[in-house]
Image (tube, helix red, strand yellow):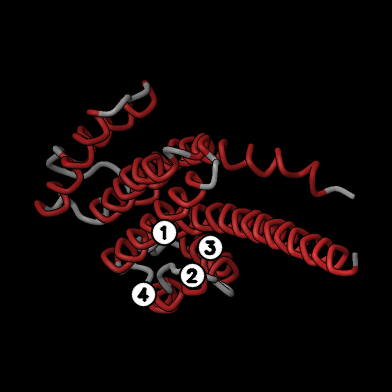
């Protein structure tokens, strides 16, 4: 009799331990998913702000410099305590001080942005595997956003010259071709045509750097708002469950 009770108690303890272990595992996975979803949103914030910082880097007028300095302070906060290495991601925060000191370094900005795009792709894959199928396509959309933002940055740089330099012209034309091969709205088509006539093929550049920046920024902001929608829906769906 005593043996039967002991065995029953042992079995009950074993089952309870197994149940608690499964519960702890599920809670850990849920916490990890929430952490990675928040980091994905943060990476997109970093991406968009870093793209804007790059676009302002070649502008020396006072309003652009003031806007760039304000962006740098925002980026300081966004990079603070970047948990990349702890989640098996690149330690991109270590490159930010160099960009802050050299805002006109276009290539260095592109390098860090490419790193952010890789982080976004990794986080999307992990979250998709964890059951967040609606997030599929965010990384690809971010590459589309970078095409627009890189076009803005190159156009701003070209507008500092009396005529578009051949190396910048080639890069701009390649980006325009890529954008034209994707679904192009009327607003973007008008912008591309204006860049072609007043910057790329014009004998005398007729757009100022700040005009190029202002021309493309509304399209970039609208594109970014659309790509954030699935992620915002994720947080909205989880909000009621987190309320006491």
Q: CA distance from mark 2 to mark 3?
A: 22 Å
Q: Dot 1 corresponds to which residue?
A: 119
Q: Dot 2 corresponds to which residue?
A: 84
| Image coordinates for residue 3, horizontal then vertical, percent | 84, 68
236 up-or-down from 12: above or below: above
Are there few (<14), some (14-19), or many (20+) residues within 10 Å of tag 2? some
Q: Secondary structure at mark 1?
A: helix
Q: Are marks 2 and 3 in contact (CB under 8 Å)?
A: no
Give the camera-side residue of 48 and 55: 48
Q: CA distance from mark 4 to mark 1?
A: 23 Å
Q: In the picture, residue 142 is in which quadrant?
A: top left
Q: Closer to the camera: disc 2 or disc 3? A: 2
Sequence order check: which comes first, mark 4 or mark 1? 4
Residue at 63% x, 41% y is 234
| Image coordinates for residue 114, horizontal then vertical, percent | 32, 59
| Image coordinates for residue 197, horizontal then vertical, percent | 20, 32
Give the camera-side residue of 42 and 23: 23
Q: Dot 3 corresponds to which residue?
A: 71
Query: Which quarter of the image is occupied by the N terminus?
Result: bottom right
Q: Dot 4 corresponds to which residue?
A: 102
Q: Are marks 4 and 1 in contact (CB under 8 Å)?
A: no
Q: CA distance from mark 4 to mark 2?
A: 23 Å
Residue at 46% x, 48% y is 124
């Amino acid at each position: 009799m005593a043996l039967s009770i002991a065995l029953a108690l042992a079995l009950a303890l074993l089952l309870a331990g197994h149940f608690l272990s499964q519960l702890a595992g599920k809670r850990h996975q849920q916490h990890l998913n929430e952490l990675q979803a928040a980091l994905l949103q943060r990476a997109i914030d970093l991406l968009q702000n870093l793209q804007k910082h790059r676009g302002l880097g070649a502008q020396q007028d006072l309003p652009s410099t003031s806007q760039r300095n304000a962006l740098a302070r925002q980026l300081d906060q966004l990079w603070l305590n970047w948990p990349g290495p702890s989640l098996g991601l690149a330690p991109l925060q270590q490159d930010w001080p160099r960009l802050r000191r050299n805002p006109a370094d276009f290539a260095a900005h592109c390098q860090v942005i490419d790193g952010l795009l890789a982080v976004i792709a990794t986080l999307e894959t992990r979250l998709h595997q964890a059951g967040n199928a609606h997030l599929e396509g965010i990384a690809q959309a971010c590459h589309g956003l970078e095409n627009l933002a890189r076009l803005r940055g190159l156009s701003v740089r070209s507008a500092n010259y009396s005529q578009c330099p051949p190396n910048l012209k080639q890069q701009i034309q390649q980006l325009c071709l890529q954008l034209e091969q994707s679904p192009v709205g009327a607003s973007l088509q008008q912008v591309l045509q204006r860049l072609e006539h007043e910057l790329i093929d014009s004998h005398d550049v007729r757009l100022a750097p700040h005009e190029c920046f202002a021309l493309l920024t509304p399209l970039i902001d609208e594109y970014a708002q659309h790509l954030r929608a699935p992620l915002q829906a994720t947080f909205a769906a989880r909000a009621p469950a987190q309320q006491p």
